[in-house]
Image: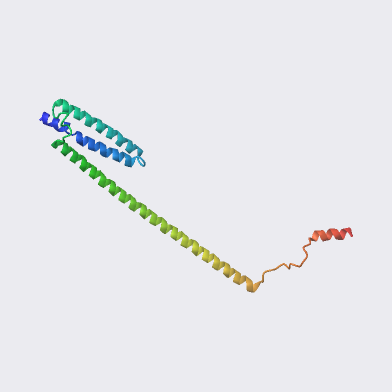
Amino acid sequence: MNNTLGNILLSQSPALFLAALLLIVRYFILRKKHHFHAVLDLILAILCIAAGVALYFLGINSGLFTIKDFWQVRTAGYVGMAVVAVLFLILLVRSVVHCVAHRREERAAKGRENAHQKELEEVRQKAYADGMADAMAAEAKLSPEEPPVEIPTDAPAEEPEANAETADVQ
């Protein structure tokens, strides 16, 4: 049993390389928005590559495979790659659902903002129309009662103090 379990573990190198490849792709996707998670993915990818290489050397040392046939993926390796692929698909579906929900939330917020701006514009237009109506009503009330006072343009513009000084001098 121990020997079989060891053979299964030593055959997981292709799964580790696939996981490292997917983590590196995820690093390039996340590096702009989530620096911390991207760095963790990169570190984990490097560890997966190192573990894959170590498992290959241990498998060669234990006689599980030779240097000539190490590229052949064994049944346990296919199972490991299937597990990695299933985990990747689960994470992919979760991220797509998250992106769709985020996009739906952004659209709803944009719609609410547009409705709010439209409401503010309607209030502004109503206030402007009410102000214009009040001004027209005030102007209509003012014109029949009192005509606006106009200053004649041909009247001299002399100051009363200047007239008083010239009268004292004479």
- Describe residue 76's horizontal placement relative to residue 129 as left or right: left
Residue depicted at x 16% and y 27%: 60
Residue 111: quarter of image: bottom left
Residue that protrudes farthest toward the left in the picture: 1
- Describe residue 60's horizontal placement relative to residue 165 as left or right: left
Along the viewing direction, whichever of 105 and 22 lies nearer the viewer: 22
Residue depicted at x 23% and y 44%: 89
Residue 67, percent from left and from top: 17, 29
Along the viewing direction, whichever of 35 and 131 lies nearer the viewer: 35
- Describe residue 158's horizontal placement relative to residue 84 as left or right: right
Along the viewing direction, whichever of 155 and 148 lies nearer the viewer: 155
- Describe residue 73's horizontal placement relative to residue 129 as left or right: left
Residue depicted at x 14% and y 33%: 8
Residue 122, percent from left and from top: 46, 62
Q: Quadrant of the C terminus?
A: bottom right
98 vs 119: above or below: above
Residue 145: quarter of image: bottom right
50 vs 143: above or below: above
Residue depicted at x 44% and y 60%: 118
Residue 117, percent from left and from top: 44, 58
Residue 127, percent from left and from top: 51, 63
161 vs 79: above or below: below
